[in-house]
């Protein structure tokens, strides 16, 4: 079974340009309580390196591109995010790392909960131990 699950948002644009809509509990599979975006990332400085105990997220590269490594402790998959209306689901208990950011990359992330430091697992060995219980 693949770790990678995509969410395709409809492009409702016309000859004037693109219009992509994300709706909570419709094409986004949860209520959106937080969003954040990463821009100006250095191509050679990876980010992420954590998992969440409960948090659900969907990541969209709305400009440029980057790669994301998804790891459930058993299997690893790397994907390229490069379509503004194609989001990568990041479920709980999946270690993720972002890297190889293009200079113009803007990565938008939608989350189902507010920020909670206690939900983070920032040590890979701790993550792997939790997954084997």
Image (tube, helix red, strand yellow):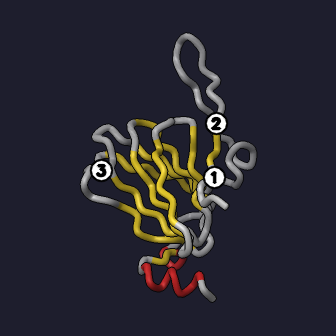
Q: As displayed, is residue 87 above or below residue 119? A: above
Instruction: From the image, tell me which residue sits under label 3.
Output: 41
Instruction: From the image, tell me which residue sits under label 2.
Output: 9
Tag nearer the camera, 1 or 3:
1
Q: As displayed, is residue 114 above or below residue 44? A: below
**What residue occupies the far top of the structure in this picture?**
15
Q: Quadrant of residue 47?
A: bottom left
Locate residue 88 relative to residue 61 in the image: left or right.
right
| Precedes in sequence: disc 2 or disc 3 | 2
Locate residue 88 relative to residue 25 in the image: left or right.
left
Check if mark 2's residue and mark 1's residue have beta carbons within 8 Å: no
Local crowd size for mark 1, using a 10 Å CA cut-off: few (<14), some (14–19), many (≥20) = few
Quadrant, the N terminus: bottom right
* Image spot of residue 26 (x, y percent): 75, 44
Q: As displayed, is residue 86 above or below residue 53? A: above
Kindly state the secondary structure of the residue where label 3 is placed.
loop
* Image spot of residue 119 (x, y percent): 54, 75
Total numbered labels placed on residues in the image: 3
Tag nearer the camera, 2 or 1:
1
On residue 5, which mark appears?
Answer: 1
Q: CA distance from mark 2 to mark 1?
A: 13 Å
Kindly state the secondary structure of the residue where label 1 is placed.
loop
Local crowd size for mark 3, using a 10 Å CA cut-off: few (<14), some (14–19), many (≥20) = some
Kindly state the secondary structure of the residue where label 2 is placed.
loop
* Image spot of residue 107 (x, y percent): 43, 46
Quadrant, the C terminus: bottom right
Q: Quadrant of residue 74?
A: bottom right
């Amino acid at each position: 079974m693949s770790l990678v699950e995509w969410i395709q948002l409809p492009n409702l644009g016309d000859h004037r340009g693109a219009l992509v809509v994300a709706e909570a509990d419709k094409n986004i599979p949860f209520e959106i309580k937080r969003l954040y975006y990463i821009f100006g990332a250095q191509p050679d400085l990876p980010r992420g390196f954590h998992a969440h105990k409960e948090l659900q997220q969907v990541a969209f590269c709305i400009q440029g591109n980057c790669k994301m490594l998804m790891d459930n402790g058993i299997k690893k998959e790397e994907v390229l995010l490069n379509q503004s209306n194609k989001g990568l689901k990041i479920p709980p208990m999946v270690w993720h790392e972002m890297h190889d950011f293009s200079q113009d990359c803007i990565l938008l992330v939608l989350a189902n909960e507010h920020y909670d430091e206690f939900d983070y697992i920032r040590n890979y060995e701790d993550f792997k131990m939790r997954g084997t219980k």
